[in-house]
Amino acid sequence: MSLSPSDDIALSEIGPAGPRPQAVGRELVGRSPGQLAWTRLRRDRTAMISGTVLAVLFIVAVAAPLIERLYGVGPQQQFQDALDSYGMPLGYSGGITGAHWFGLEPGLGRDIFIRMVYGLRTSLFVAVVAAVVTTLIGVAAGVLAGYLGGWIDAVIGWVTDFALAMPFLIVALAFVPTVALRFYGQREAEPALFRVAVIIVVFAIFGWTSAARLVRGQIVSLREREFVEAAQASGVGLAHMLFRQLLPNIWAPILVSFSLAVPSYVTNEAVLSFLGVGVVDPTPDFGAMIFRSINYLQTDPAYVFFPGVTIFVLVLAFNLFGDSLRDALDPKSSR
Amino acid sequence: MTLQERPLDRDAPGGTPVRQREPGPVAEPLLTVEGLTRHFPVRDRLGPRSIVRAVDGVDFDVRPGETLGLVGESGCGKTTTGRMIVRLLEPTAGRIRFDGRDITHTRGRALRPLRRELQIIFQDPYSSLNPRHTIGKIVGIPLQVNGVRPEGGIKRRVQELLEVVGLNPEHYNRYPHEFSGGQRQRVGIARALALRPRLIVADEPVSALDVSIQAQVVNLLRQLQRELGLAFLFIAHDLAVVRHFSHRVAVMYLGRIVEIGARDDIYRRPRHPYTRALLSAVPDVDRPGGATGRIRLAGDPASPADPPSGCRFRTRCWKARDICATEEPTLSPREGGTQLTACHFPETEPPQ
Amino acid sequence: MLRFLIRRVLSAVLVLFAVSVLSFLMFFALPRDPVTAMCPKNCNPARLERVRQELGLSDPLYQQYVGYMKGIFVGRDLNSALGGHCDAPCLGYSYVNSEPVTRTITRVLPVTLSIVIPAAVLWLALGVGLGMISALRRGTVLDRLAIGFSLTGASLQLYFVGAVLLLVFSYTLHVVPVPHYTSIFHNPFDWADGLVLPWLTLAFLFAAIYARLSRAQMLETLSEDFVRTARAKGLAKSTVYGRHALRAAITPIVTIAGMDVGAALGGTVVTETTFGLQGLGRTVWDAVREGDLPTLMATVLIAAVFVVVANILVDVLYAFIDPRVRLR
């Protein structure tokens, strides 16, 4: 009986145009599931396009002050002389000129382009931070609930139900200004960062539940697998079990959940601003812009289009990328 | 290695089986199991809670360097027994003794040294290895977690182990999905060997493999037993495979052992009707041109939640009489045989 | 089954209790003085003090809470200035609107219901239908169009779409009147006419999401072995897909739909603000801006009730569709 393994080697993936690896001398490196997924992602055209769009938008957001310097116009500058006596921007389509690429705001005469660049910055910052925080909390809760079960699971489940029962929008509407008032009173100016922090906190309180549910479900099905028992039989501790055995197996759904959470927070932040409890004017923001534009729908329809289309493109790119990410990580998923 | 004659087990007066030890090179059993029991309470909708008696009073022992085969159909409790022995499950009752020490309820810190002596091989090669770890890491984790520092380092040791089980040590950095089922089982075996245990519970290690690969893996286990002096509790439902690798065999039915004895005794002279029925279903290569008369069992297998009174097998046994329903047969030597059988009317004639 | 139901209802009651306590604390226990908030801008200190007395705000918090809850279930006595006895369900008195909150609610609730329920019917029919069909016709032009539609819809913002539709159909083309509310009992045609834009907006956006969801679910179900077996057995396509596959695919959608409808009922703020309709959501918004705490508290509770009841209904429905749930 031969004990040589060459009889039943079954390499499921042979590298692109690579020769059979030499067995002697060189150390063979296998392709981890993560590397395989990355390769699949690179081949997906939609992913590459949407990914590029997102990268560009991120760069724009981060480089906002630089862009302001190059562009020459600030977000708070008012160009009253470019407005007519009714406050409407002169010129074509809301005041588009070489100096003001997207035109001017009616009423205050601020430049729309640079305000949108800064608005992008706010949106992405809030959305990414909120997504990170909620994913972290959600994963922690889900892992504990899923693996330890028992009363921990029951408690976390109940808290999840509770968080879902609270009407998010209404509570946010009530909570945000109340908290702001408590710290800053009626007359004091509230720093933008504080408001941003409050918004993120509200998102965190409500948003962790979906990640927690997802992770819990994954862990529950995972803990029946024999490698978990094998790890127990080897004598691993709880921390090792959670972080080294279980978590590496669920990073894929977590990543997908994160990538789809970001656009939802972009939307939610814009909704809050639309309703007046988001970032305070004069800080630029998409939602606030669109809210203002509704009053000018008939007189200056261009005003509504710029922020509306931009936010649409942003969210669409995230959704497309998230979908492609999911496909790359789990090729069996239905598409 | 020649098979030692098994010491004769005699009934002590009073009915409780007591093992008499014959002096000899094969001394104390490594693992002794007495009255091992595991019940699972089942929460029913509205009705009373029922209890699944997965394992209901099991006795056996395993000597150093020998293999005890544990066979039975699905649901008879053999996997549960195996899990209890390596302490992945808590016994509801009974006792487990390893190397003289009572380990029935050991847990936590005290369990650590035990892990180095008792290990387990799992059935499913596709789910028993963490898909995110390289096989080097998989085999190395027991060493890492138990603070073992072999000379030359963990990596060197892992590569030695890979070689021992017949894998290319250069594949240290490969992932499980790059291997076939048989190879993955070898990885599982290497992992079980890492801490140099003295007894390995092999829970259906070849059931999920192609028949041609099964032989390879079983031969590997035999070789390892020879070279390392390992004892095995070999759990399986395939009698042909068990025959190849066990010194002694125990047959389980519905949570109880119905027959236990030396391999040849069980296979050549099965006395319990259930054992007979099981063996009659094994295709016999030695007899071309027709299998021996296949015994078909009538009736449905009883449920472990509600086992029949008296002898549990009586609902499917063609020899059942009144006494079988009222009095549970004990596992003891019966007239005309050297193995222990739990039956009021054991078979006396060898099968055709 | 009954046991399951009882357990769910108990858990729901507990949740509602927690919601009521939390919102009570949030509104009445924050350092900001609730009275100043409740009383419109031009209150002098004497009036403030009297209001405080009338509302029993000098009482310990838990007593106030009990009084409030008692009011909801059996009614309670308010000061005569506030209208004397307040029948159950008593939700307090709003200084801002100068009327009992209950009356405000009864006025605005039908608006929200009229917006959400027909829209929900539309979006479920359209979304789930589209999703299922595109799953069955995977890869065809219809499928691609459906995917495009759902991605677009899922990425659009409600107020943006609403604004654009308003601009196009109402202000420019004059096809539909400016959105307004008339009771269905007064004039059904005007009711529909006034609400068609919000319906279409909501339907479009949510249908997109549900199309995506049900397509994915259906595809997953269709790839399961039992579908192949059913086809191999010779069952007609319509039976296999319509009865077996649909049933399996629809269960998660039911859960999400229930949650969404429940949430929508409590949160149509954006729709109502965009279209200028005075429903529950808009009332909440006004209450926030004007610091009308009793109204705010009441609306939070009602919204929570919607969500919780929707969840229970969904669970019951789920138990009917999926027998495994019953056996737990």
Image (cartoon, coloured by chain):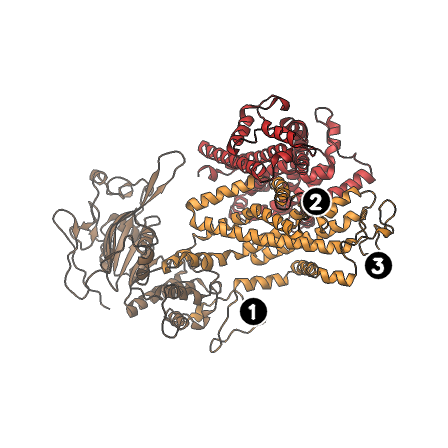
Residue A225 image-quadrant placement: bottom left
Residue of label 1:
A15
Label 3 to label 2: alpha-carbon separation: 29 Å
Q: Chain of mark 2?
A: A
Frontmost of labels 3 and 1 is 3
The image quadrant that residue B129 belongs to is bottom left
**Crowdedness near tag 2: few (<14), some (14–19) or many (≥20) residues, C-alpha within 10 Å:** many
- What residue type is disc 2 on? Phe
Task: Kindly indicate whether the residue at mark 1 contacts the one at mark 3 (C-beta within 8 angstroms).
Answer: no
Whether residue C310 sits left or right of residue B289 in the image: it is right
Labels 3 and 1 positioned on one and the same chain? yes
- Position of residue C2 relative to residue C211, above or below, is above
Disc with the residue nearer the chain's start (2 vs 1): 1
Which comes before the other along the chain, label 3 or label 2? 3
Label for residue A98? 3
Q: In what element is the residue under mark 3? A: loop
Q: Is residue A185 above or below residue B20?
A: above
Q: Which residue is label 2 attached to?
A: A274
- The residue lying toward the viewer, choosing from C261 and B58, is C261
Where residue A196 appears, x then y in whole percent? 64, 50
Label 2 SS = helix
Q: Which chain is red?
A: C
Q: Label 3 crowding class (10 Å Cα cut-off): few <14, some 14-19, many 20+? A: few
Question: Mark 2 or 1, which is nearer the eye?
Answer: 2
The orange-tinted chain is A
